[in-house]
């Protein structure tokens, strides 16, 4: 029963994040948003489209489930595969550059340092061990 509750919370957080991302995508940069505008967006019949943020989250979830914990190499591979399938999700210029570096042989945990002097959170994450039920 406990694993069913955890699974339900995990799925709920993924769905909630994706819906929030898709609803907010067209509102980015605004200082504030009237609730009526959000309701209007949610009521439209046109499908909502999520962005690169949710796309990357999907890669994180896929990797955590498949490897039963954190595996940076697997996660980077999934990010690259997902980006290759749907590059139109709104990625900025940085991630595709990092993906190209990894494809060319740069290790996943150092590729970002070529673009971002201090690296990224990926390097810090490589020292974590996240277990999944």
Image: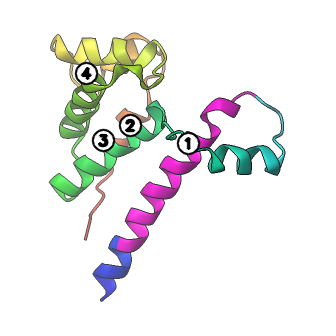
Q: Residue furthest bottom?
A: 1
In percent of the image, x 83 and y 39: which residue is there?
32
Within 10 Å of disc 2 (Cα), the crowding (few <14, some 14-19, many 20+) is many
Q: Disc 3, disc 4: CB below 8 Å?
A: no
- Mark 1, secondary structure of its residue: helix
Q: From which residue to which does the magenta span run?
A: 8-29
Q: Disc 3, disc 2: CB below 8 Å?
A: yes
Q: Name the residue nearer the viewer: 99 or 129.
A: 99
Determine the CA span between mark 3 and mark 2. 5 Å
Checking the image for residue 104, the label placed there is: none
The earlier-in-sequence mark between 3 and 4 is 3
Within 10 Å of disc 1 (Cα), the crowding (few <14, some 14-19, many 20+) is many
Checking the image for residue 56, the label placed there is: 2
Within 10 Å of disc 3 (Cα), the crowding (few <14, some 14-19, many 20+) is many
Identify residue for label 3: 59
Depth check, mark 2 against mark 4: the one in front is: 4
Query: Most prominent secondary structure in the magenta stretch?
Result: helix
Identify residue for label 4: 84
Q: Disc 2, disc 1: CB below 8 Å?
A: no
Quadrant of res 10:
bottom left
Does the magenta-highlighted stretch encompass residue 27? yes
Determine the CA span between mark 2 and mark 4. 12 Å
Q: Disc 2, disc 4: CB below 8 Å?
A: no
Residue 121 is situated, as x and y percent measured from the top left of the image, at 44, 35
Q: Name the residue nearer the viewer: 56 or 107.
A: 56
Determine the CA span between mark 1 and mark 4. 20 Å
Horizontal side of residue 82 vs 43, given as left or right: left
Checking the image for residue 21, the label placed there is: 1
The earlier-in-sequence mark between 1 and 4 is 1
Quarter of the image that includes the C terminus: bottom left
């Amino acid at each position: 029963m406990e694993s069913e509750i955890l699974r339900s919370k995990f799925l709920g957080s993924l769905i909630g994040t994706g819906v929030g991302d898709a609803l907010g995508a067209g509102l980015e940069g605004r200082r504030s948003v009237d609730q009526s505008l959000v309701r209007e967006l949610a009521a439209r019949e046109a499908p909502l489209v999520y962005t690169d943020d949710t796309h990357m989250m999907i890669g994180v979830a896929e990797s955590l489930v498949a490897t039963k914990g954190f595996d940076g190499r697997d996660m980077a591979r999934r990010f690259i595969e997902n980006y290759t399938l749907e590059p139109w999700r709104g990625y900025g210029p940085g991630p595709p550059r990092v993906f190209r570096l990894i494809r060319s042989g740069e290790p996943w945990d150092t590729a970002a340092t070529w673009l971002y002097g201090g690296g990224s959170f990926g390097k810090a994450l490589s020292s974590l061990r996240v277990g999944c039920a």
